[in-house]
Image (cartoon, rainbow, N blue to C red):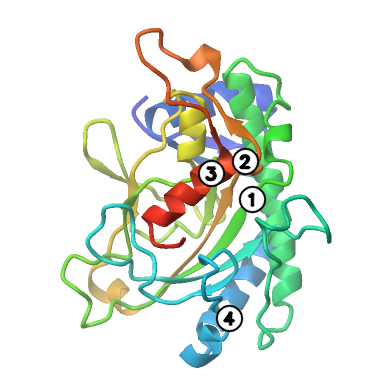
């Protein structure tokens, strides 16, 4: 396979299963079109995200939850650092998580969302977007299940009430005093099951291929870049690859303008045991030991300075 697959979700799931599986096996990424997120919703969400990030710094910082690990609300510029990176990323972001009913078994793990008072329609729009991301992600997981020889609904129980997070990302114009070597998002792998990314049309997103070369990822407007996270890599014993990727600094005029994107980190439910699937385990390789999804998440969050 020479290039990342571009998949239309308008096709039957069984028809796209092996195309998307092959792309995830080779690159860890696929482009997904004709998904459940309408262009109207995308446009509304992008406008509201810009309005939030345009607020004064003090107003934004009022929504930063000390000790919350960035799970909800605002995370200021220069907070997150990729595992083993020398510099903090040049970004700020806002997190929206799952709404749980009072008394839910996972309430101690998933805190309530908070919402900015200054932006009208923020909550309704981003709750709608969260559900549209989730619907699209479950369709992708159905295709993955078929590719792995499982029932199409195999992943449904694994992600029900999962600790999924939607991130509104702002990469400001490059500051003149940025540390040498600092970039918008340093090379990293995602922690979660799969990531669905809106807003990757502008140049900068790259993946590291098997040959050790950086490849540009440029979805058409409105399409999603979807990638395998470390949890799915672990579940499939590396058959589907969690690929290192980054967002590099732009050159010229692009360096003087902001970049915005919205990734959705789809997670397993906290009590799901990530145990390598038998059909994926190589007889000559020792699979990684089983671990609960929540324990794995906390381990990785500590590595990137968010817990």
| Residue 244, percent from left and from top | 33, 43
Residue ID for mark 1: 163
Residue 106, image x and y in percent? 72, 51
Q: Earlier in the sequence, mark 3 or mark 4?
A: 4
Q: Quadrant of the N terminus?
A: top left
Q: Which residue is mark 2?
A: 268
Q: Secondary structure at mark 3?
A: helix
Q: Give the structural element (helix, strand or loop) at label 4.
A: loop
Q: Is residue 249 left or right of residue 191?
A: left
Q: Earlier in the sequence, mark 4 or mark 2?
A: 4
Mark nearest the camera among 1 and 3 is 3
Mark 4–mark 2 contact, CB under 8 Å? no
Q: Nearer the viewer, residue 302 or 81?
A: 302
Instruction: Relative to 204, say whether 122 is above or below.
Output: below
In the picture, measured across the screen, residue 301 lies left or right of residue 264, that is: left
Residue under the image location 52 percent in, 53 percent down: 197
Work out how far the residue at label 1 is from the one at label 4, CA to CA, in angstroms. 20 Å
Crowd tier of the residue under label 4, counting other residues whose Cα lies within 10 Å: few below 14, some 14–19, many 20 or above: some
Q: Quadrant of residue 124?
A: bottom right
Return the mark for residue 63: 4
Q: Is residue 158 above or below residue 110?
A: above
Measure the alpha-carbon separation of dots 1 and 3.
12 Å
The answer to whether mark 1 and mark 2 are in CB contact below 8 A is yes
Residue 191 visible in image? yes
What's the residue at 71%, 19% (across, down)?
151
Image point (45%, 62%), residue name:
306
Q: Mark 1 or mark 4: which comes first in sequence? A: 4
Residue of label 3:
295
Dividing the picture into quadrants, the one containing residue 121 is bottom right
């Amino acid at each position: 396979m020479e290039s990342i697959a571009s998949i239309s979700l308008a096709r039957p799931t069984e028809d796209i299963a092996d195309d998307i599986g092959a792309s995830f096996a080779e690159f860890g990424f696929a482009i997904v079109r004709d998904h459940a997120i309408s262009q109207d919703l995308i446009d509304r969400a992008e406008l509201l995200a810009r309005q939030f990030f345009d607020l004064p710094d003090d107003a934004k910082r009022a929504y930063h939850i000390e000790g919350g690990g960035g799970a909800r609300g605002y995370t200021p510029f220069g907070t997150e650092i990729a595992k083993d990176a020398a510099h903090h990323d040049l970004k700020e972001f806002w997190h929206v998580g799952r709404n749980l009913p009072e008394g839910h078994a996972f309430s101690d793990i998933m805190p309530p969302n908070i919402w900015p008072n200054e932006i009208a329609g923020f909550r309704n729009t981003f709750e709608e977007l969260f559900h549209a991301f989730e619907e699209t992600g479950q369709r992708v997981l159905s295709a993955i299940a078929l590719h792995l020889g499982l029932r199409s609904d195999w992943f449904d129980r694994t992600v029900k009430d999962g600790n999924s997070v939607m991130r509104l990302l702002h990469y400001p114009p490059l500051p003149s005093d940025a540390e040498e070597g600092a970039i918008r998002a340093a090379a990293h792998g995602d922690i979660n099951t799969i990531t669905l990314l809106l807003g990757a049309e502008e140049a900068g997103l790259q993946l590291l291929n098997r040959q050790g070369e950086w490849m540009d990822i440029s979805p058409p407007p409105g399409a999603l870049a979807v990638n395998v996270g470390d949890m799915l890599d672990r579940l499939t014993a590396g058959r589907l690859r969690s690929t290192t990727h980054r967002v590099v600094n732009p050159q010229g005029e692009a360096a003087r303008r902001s970049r915005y994107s919205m990734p959705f980190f789809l997670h397993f439910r906290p009590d799901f045991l990530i145990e390598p699937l038998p059909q994926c385990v190589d007889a000559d390789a020792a699979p990684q030991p089983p671990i609960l999804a929540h324990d794995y998440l906390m381990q990785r969050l500590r590595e990137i300075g968010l817990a």
